[in-house]
Image (tube, helix red, strand yellow):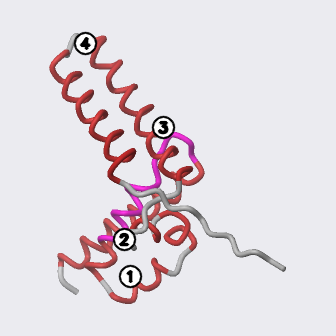
Amino acid sequence: MSGKKILYISLGVLGLGLGALGVVLPLLPAFPFLMLAAFCFGRSSEKLDRWFKSTKLYQNNLETYVKGQGMTRKTKIRVMVTVTLLMLFGFLMMVQKALYIPCGILGAVWLFHILYFCFGVKNYAIKEELVK
């Protein structure tokens, strides 16, 4: 096994672990870590990629986004709130140290993030089948 493959598998396992924690911990975002896991498993091994795509974590959090169908409104709001809270914490820390230029950069990144999730990511509506 090559060093590159081992690195991808290691990063994939780390992303999966942090993503799983992010599902249950309110301030840890699951989405970016699960995207990291999907990317790394896809680069490292077909078997790991197939396994990860068959998990509930992938199906509930990433599947519609990866297929280009977008994200549910609830997921988009959860991601935006989590990232906003984490960035606000960093912003407040930098304001205390009078680091105004980094605050401006962080504010611009936050604004881009919000605009991207509001206008760049499609809304995916869950279609429930009618039971007769």
Q: Is residue 28 magenta?
A: yes
Furthest residue toward left:
101
**Label 3 vs label 2, nearer the camera:** 3
Q: Could you say where residue 127 lies in the image, as x and y percent from the top left?
A: 62, 69
Q: Does dot 3 land on a helix, a strand or a loop?
A: helix
Taking the spot 46% from the left edge, 77% from the top edge, the residue there is: 52
Q: Which residue is mark 1?
A: 49
Q: Which residue is mark 2?
A: 38
Dominant secondary structure, magenta? helix
Asked if the residue at tag 1 contacts the one at tag 4, i.e. Cβ–Cβ closer than 8 Å, the answer is no
Q: Which residue is mark 4?
A: 97
Q: Which residue is mark 3?
A: 81
**Label 2 vs label 4, nearer the camera:** 2
**Label 4 vs label 1, nearer the camera:** 1
- Could you tell me which quadrant the C terminus lies in? bottom right
Q: Could you say where residue 46 lies in the image, as x and y percent from the top left?
A: 34, 88
Q: Amino acid at mark 1?
A: Asp
Q: Earlier in the sequence, mark 3 or mark 2?
A: 2
Above or below residue 62? Residue 44 is below
**Label 3 vs label 4, nearer the camera:** 3
Asked if the residue at tag 3 contacts the one at tag 1, i.e. Cβ–Cβ closer than 8 Å, the answer is no
Asked if the residue at tag 1 contacts the one at tag 2, i.e. Cβ–Cβ closer than 8 Å, the answer is yes
Q: Earlier in the sequence, mark 1 or mark 3?
A: 1
Measure the C-alpha gap from mark 3 to mark 4.
25 Å
Q: Amino acid at mark 3?
A: Val
Q: Amino acid at mark 4?
A: Lys
